[in-house]
Amino acid sequence: MEAPLALYRRYRPDTFEEVIGQDHVTAPLSQALDNNRVHHAYLFSGPRGCGKTTSARILARALNCESGPTSAPCGTCESCVELARGGPGSIDVIEIDAASHGGVDDARDLRERAFFSPMKARYKVYIIDEAHMVTTQGFNALLKLVEEPPSHLRFVFATTEPDKVIGTIRSRTHHYPFRLVPPKILGDYLVDLCVREGVTIEPTVVPLVVRAGAGSVRDSLSVLDQLMGGSGPDGVTYDVATALLGYTPDSLLDETVDALAAGDGGTVFGVVDKVIDTGQDPRRFAEDLLHRLRDLVVVSAVPDAVSRGVIDVSDDQGERLAGQTARFGRAELTRAADIVSQGLTDMRGATAPRLLLELMCARILLPGLDDSAEGLGARLDRVERRLSVVGTPSRPASEVQAPDAARQGLRPGPQPDGLPAPAQPASATGAATNASPPADDDTLVHGTATNESSTGDGTPAGGGGARPAAMSAPSPRAPSTTDRSQSKADPAADPPHPVRAASADLVPEPGGLSLVDVRRLWPGVLARVQGMRRYAWAVLSQNAQVIDVAGGVITIGLVNAGARDSFVRGGHDEILRQALIDELGVDWKVEAIIDGSALSGRTSRQTEPSSLPVPPSSPPGSVGRAEPSPRVEAAKEAVRSTRARSGKADQPDEPPPEVRDDDAVIDDAATSSQELLARELGAEIIDDFPHDTK
């Protein structure tokens, strides 16, 4: 059985109406044929595979048709049959390859034979393909013939480089520039050919074929013919196309873009390692990434680019592009595209393309180290995007927290970049002289305030060894005797639980924060946790990562069962919940699970610098502290008993010494946490209050 012809030969156009994407050429030529105003010499120029030689054959067929010259050949006369698709050709239509017949001797031979009349047709037509390969001497030998040819002679020069055709020849021709076929037109044409061939093709494959063809019809048909030949019972699938054409799968590009948006260096470099391990070309990956960033830049500037046809992608991919664009700013996208473009240029001829690819990704991940205008724009985009997604408490929450702040003698301070500042104490002796009057409720952000008299390290300037006080309600620990007496005397002095007071009035934005947004803002949340309880911060920063955010629940993955039990039983989930309220303005339920990948995935996200200033740490034991442990309560009771025996129980002016339970709550089951504290912080776990041996 004889193999069929190639697609570009089987579907070669026979009329100007069948030529796609060249209406600016075919329409004037058709009009000239119908008006019988055909010139004696034409110059067809343009990229390869866009229809130059095919249009020259159609022109010769239209000139020699028995009913012509006409723009619509009859298709039945002898000349039309000979010049039709798959026909034997006509003796009066001569095609010359100038690459092998471009010398002066070939030009002289053509000139001698051109004066003979055609054998059967009306005109003798010379189609000189790759005309730019004709030498200067050859063009000069044809100059007189092209300028004043016999009445039966017509010339058509086809070339991809019209500038190499000497000016004396160009001035004697009608020049028609051909162009690359638009992707939309070419994609529809490929789908139509697949229907004619009876081959199933996935919609996501068509853009790949169009991109591989780069606007050339012949190249696109060659690629499609190759995919059809290697297709199975399911037709041309996306997996087969990406593997055969060498393009990066969309899933890998989506993973890369999401990681760049979240600043997740571990995922980005993991993708690079996967690209190398699968044998893909780093240059092709960089090119595909640049193409994706270009689409994101276009969608950012034109939100309806997909519906308007500016970007030729499927509907589901258009939705993904819109979601990815929302995670970047325009300056970030432009800067990332510039870095990838420059990196792609540097990769040409490089001996270590993987190294250049990794350095390129590192530059995108670190806009803070870029002192150029693009780097500044990227940092501003991050600040604006963070301010747009961070919620703020409603009016009732401020009204609940402001009176408590006034009772403690605190005042609000300046807040850099719109971030809530942590609470700082007023001096015990200088509160009346140094502290300003309490401000309005609206000046309190997230129930926190600052004291301007504090030193740079967070220690009060005039308070000596006094502990910092919390901004909002006191910690929910067991009240002392003095506290109980004050509570009975003044019921209004007992403020509500801090977590309930803040969460009851917050108005979270449903769907406002995604998993990527939370991971990007996670360093700020950890800073809040560190100010509330350092041990909870150590557990979260060293053993945990964010797994999922959905339905008002944030899922935290910890490395083992001991770390998870310590996290839950130690009340750290409430600490994290309050930190999320203060930092992100969302009241989510915290769910802890065991996830062994948390230890390996935390390093890259924890070590990356944040693009926003981190507020100074709040004092330990402030808003959102968990219930104190029984051991600490027993120690406090022992202190009160000692004071009672010594006769100091009736002195309300001297409160009992406060026992800090910040880092003393160590779960015996969390063996890994103890080892972690000893290794990372150099801590030695001891009992604060040894048991009496008597």
Image (tube, rainbow, N blue to C red):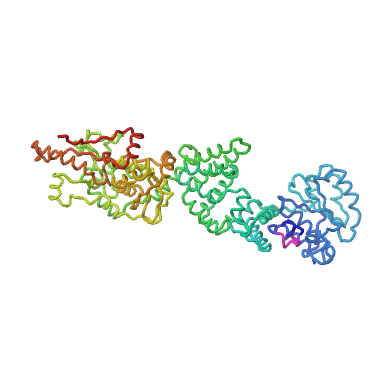
Is 16 situated left or right of 459 in this image? right
Is 676 situated left or right of 28 in this image? left
Residue 343, position as x, y percentages in the image: 57, 40
Residue 556, position as x, y percentages in the image: 37, 48
Considering the image in quadrants, where does the N terminus appear? Answer: bottom right
Residue at 80% in and 66% down? 75
Residue at 61% in and 48% down? 246
Instruction: Give the magenta range.
Output: 13-19
Considering the image in quadrants, where does the C terminus appear? Answer: top left
Classify residue 634 by image quadrant: top left
Residue 31, position as x, y percentages in the image: 75, 62
Residue at 42% in and 46% down? 520
Residue 445 seen in this snapshot: no
Q: Camera-side residue: 246 or 530?
A: 246
Residue 615, position as x, y percentages in the image: 34, 41
Query: In the rendered view, would you say 294 is above or below 22?
Result: above
Task: Based on the picture, tell me whether residue 584 belongs to the magenta stretch.
Answer: no
Is 224 situated left or right of 156 in this image? left
Classify residue 133 by image quadrant: top right
Is 238 situated left or right of 452 in this image? right
Q: Camera-side residue: 81 or 678?
A: 678
Query: In the rendered view, would you say 561 is above or below 460?
Result: below
Residue 566 seen in this snapshot: yes
